[in-house]
Image (spheres, rainbow, N blue to C red):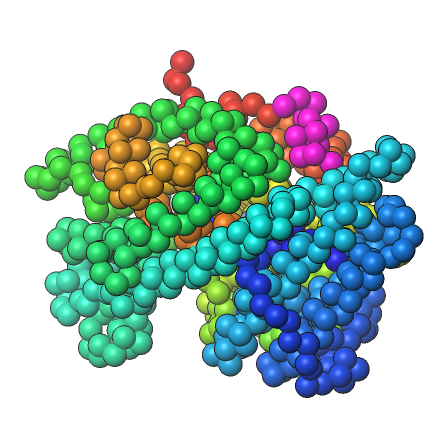
Amino acid sequence: MRLLSTRSLTLLVLIAAIVSVVAVKTAHQTKAMNSTTELSTNENPLVMKWEGPYGGVPPFDRVQIPLFKPALEAAMAEQLEEVDKIARNSAAPDFENTIAALERSGSTFDRVTTLYGVWGSTMASPEYQAVQREMAPRLAGFNDQITQNEALFKRIEAVYNSPAKAKLTPEQQRVTWLYYTNFVRAGARLSPEAKKRLSAINQQLAGLFTKFGQNVLAEETDQFIVLKSEDELAGLPPSLRDAAAAAAETKKQPGTWVIMNTRSSIDPFLTYSDRRDLREKAWRMFVNRGDNGDEHDNNAIITDILQLRAERAKLLGYATHAHWRLENSMAKTPERALELMEAVWKPSVARVHEEVADMQALADKEGAKIKIEPWDYRYYMEKVRKAKYDLDQNEIKPYLQLEKLREGIFWVAGELFNFNFTPVTNVPVAHPDIRVWEVTDKTTKRLIGLWYFDPYARAGKRSGAWMNAYRNQERINGEITTIVSNNSNFVKGKPGEPVLISWDDATTMFHEFGHALHGLSSNVTYPSLSGTAVPRDYVEFPSQLLEHWLFTPEVLQRFALHYQTGKPIPQELVDKIKRSATFNQGFATVEYLSAALVDMKLHLAGDKKIDADAFERETLAQLGMPKEIVMRHRTPQFLHVFSSDGYSAGYYSYLWSDVLTADAFGAFVEGKGPYDKAVAERLRKNVFSVGNTIDPAAAYRAFRGRDPKIDALMKKRGFTTKS
Ligand SMILES: [Zn+2]
């Protein structure tokens, strides 16, 4: 059994440079389990043990949507039976018959939900979505049935409090602690009445989360801007015009161009549209999602969610929801997370004032006769980039071929971790575009695992890029190797034509591959502690760290090759990219950090009744928010925080991980450079291979020889005081 709360972390998503969303299984509904199955376990291929090479591989070729429901039902029933057997064991509880037994349970459930999850993120047809609507609450209820099993918790508690625990290995002690603490945090120690109230709160919250998300989705779907003339398209590059024309088709507005109310549509429009009036209109539409005083308004929902969360935290014995959420994080307390955010806040605001001054000067020089407003920021920022650095994104692209960069990340993995990648064709895939590589140790030839690569966009695939683990490394019952995947949404080129990607996309590729390497390097015994199953404010550290290797001359000279001439990217262009690395970091940091600060303060406010709009306004005023910038996610549309508990009081995590990232890369810089084998070995040994077997702060200290310092982050973002 992999604990649901940790397993959910294996799906790691990167949507934009600093904003990723981890899909979270919320488990707050109870419903009677219906265990009738239409097919017996023996007949349903989704339930069967995985067969084939590499210790078995996912049977992607045998998936049919109607098989999911009976497979999930059979898997849940099987695991409940296994858990019940553990709970009712007449032998005195010990590590083997309780914790290890739980770790051995649920293998069918893991296999079935892996396939189900892959379809949910990459093949979600309407037929699949109908199954999902039916099964989501039942899966949530299933989780509650386990954590509220009193006999089971008593055994876990007995092992946790037993003097015999001291004789267990550190990893066994850690997994015991994880079970105990997760059950307690889910209310296992409460009185029957308190448990009942907790369940009621959880169910109410689940309903509010769904409503919140649907309201935002409705406003993103129903609201859009129709452009009707060339004049209204002024400034838009061809790719954006094409996308707007395609959007017009889907919105049944033939002969026009449509700007959708989504980030991927609005951000480029704000960057390129010469029409200031339309920029303002688009900006207002986007930042007011969920805040229009109509039937999709989220303000009242937020008030209710915050009050229920505060009540739940008190019930569970915590000062606030933030204290409950952060207990098992690396930061440990909201105060420490706030301390970091406040340290970065002032210098980033100061940088924003400089950026605005640059933009204002440029606008004045052009005779625009305007004062920079929020809907001008991206537009003038792009102009300043060209003026200051002579850097045009379109100049870089011809050197960034998707397949060459894939070879580049393989090469980096070989240099840092001694991995070798060999393509294989003897395993089934969910779609013909997906390719698979076998990963082995270069020296010993030992099998490390499999890496699936699903690079292209298609209908039913979620946007963004992410890593997923199909099977975690473990050795509780002999050596099990891992199976991981990287997924993205590049537009497939014509046959024989290379796919060219942007610098940002290349960075994202390295990022997601960092998550994959974190999974592949795993060297643990117990599956709940394996690979990327680490605290949320630590999980982005290995991935953000890998981004640094794109910039190494070794990678650029070998793999950033012009798609026509085969020549490496000119040093002059690399220098331009390097010089502009800290450009616009004021905007990016303040936009993100204001949202992270409001998130944390909302969840520290306790159970007083909160008016979201007023709270946001007053908090930003107190912080001294520059008026030219709006929060990356305003409260009424903050899906990270209000569509599940996922990132509630947790949006700070990206910054926290980035402190580690910047500081960790310093270890290479201080050594022999990015390919210093000794530093890489320390990184593998203490960070990439240990999963959640040790406290992340201790793991980091073992790697770096000290606690992380904030200086490297300040330098990376260009916030160090000039001296
Ligand atoms: Zn990530």
Camera-side residue of 561 and 175: 175
Locate residue 124, reporting x and y percent.
52, 73
Q: What's the magenta region? A: 694-707
Q: Residue at horizontal 66%, vertical 66%?
A: 114
Q: Name the quadrant of the N terminus.
A: bottom right
Q: Is residue 472 left or right of residue 623?
A: right
Q: Is residue 293 above or below residue 542?
A: below
Locate residue 488, reporting x and y percent.
52, 61
Figure quadrant of residue 541:
top right
Q: Residue at horizontal 27%, vertical 57%?
A: 297
Q: Is residue 217 above or below residue 613?
A: below
Figure quadrant of residue 543:
top right
Q: Is residue 512 above or below residue 623?
A: below
Q: Is residue 721 magenta?
A: no
Camera-side residue of 117 and 648: 648
Locate residue 499, reporting x and y percent.
50, 64
In the displayed orientation, state which residue is furthest to the top: 723
Camera-side residue of 398 and 298: 298
